[in-house]
Amino acid sequence: IKGGDGNFLVKIDELKKLGAVNFELSGKKSILLYNGGQIRAFENICTHKGGPSKLVDDKLVCQWHGAIFDPMTGDALVGPAPQGSRLKEIRLTIHNGNIYTAPTE
């Protein structure tokens, strides 16, 4: 999915089934997550070496070197991502069961 400011990403019902959806925003790989009723989106760029992560057992795991991130906060939980680092969160809006990227101010 290619997104832009205020662009439609996916319906909530579809995200619930999939758990995660990859998309691109302003040329950056990003990931949209559904976890326990919560919806979050982050730039999908590991804070270690920039690899992509994947949702595995309710954690975001970098596919390159195995760093683990919290899917609700983006906080690095397990290295080699630097302690205290986090994935950049992407603001969202939800309207009529649809998820959109929030317009930037």
Image (cartoon, helix red, strand yellow):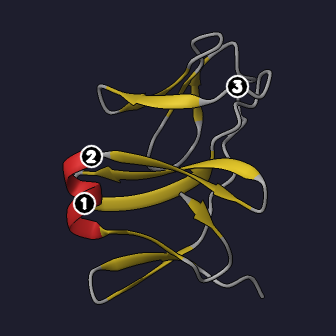
Instruction: Indicate the amino acid at tag 2.
Output: Leu
Most extreme residue toward the front is: 1
Dot 1: element: helix
| Disc 2/disc 1 C-alpha distance (Å) | 6 Å
Gap in Å between the C-alphas at discs 1 and 3? 26 Å
Residue neighbourhood size for the residue with mark 3, other residues' Cα within 10 Å, grouped as few (<14), some (14–19), many (≥20) = some
Per the image, label 3 sits on a secondary structure element best described as loop
Q: Based on the displayed image, in which of its 4 quarters is residue 53 positioned?
A: top right
Of residues 60 and 22, the one nearer the viewer is: 22
Residue 27 on image: x %, y % = 78, 55
**Residue 48: x %, y % from top left:** 77, 22
Relative to 85, residue 49 above or below: above
Image mark for residue 29: none
Q: For residue 105, which quarter of the picture?
A: bottom right
Residue identifier under label 3: 51
x then y, percent, for residue 58: 32, 33
- In percent of width and height, residue 65 lies at 64, 10
Q: Are marks 2 and 1 in contact (CB under 8 Å)?
A: yes
Q: In this view, does 3 lie to the left or right of 56?
A: right
Q: Which amino acid does label 3 sit on?
A: Gly
Find the distance from the CA under tag 3 to the CA under tag 2.
Answer: 21 Å
Q: Earlier in the sequence, mark 1 or mark 3?
A: 1
Q: What amino acid type should be assigned to the residue bearing mark 1? A: Glu
Q: How crowded is mark 1: few (under 14 residues within 10 Å), some or many (20 or more)?
A: some
Left or right side of 4 for 63: left
Which secondary structure, mark 2?
helix
Q: Which mark, residue 14?
A: 1
Q: Mark 2 highlights which residue?
A: 18
Q: Given contact means CB atoms under 8 Å apart, are the residues at marks 1 and 3 in contact?
A: no
- Which of pointers 3 and 2 lies earlier in the amino acid sequence? 2
Q: In this view, does 56 lie above or below 16?
A: above
Residue shown at 67%/85% (left/top)?
103
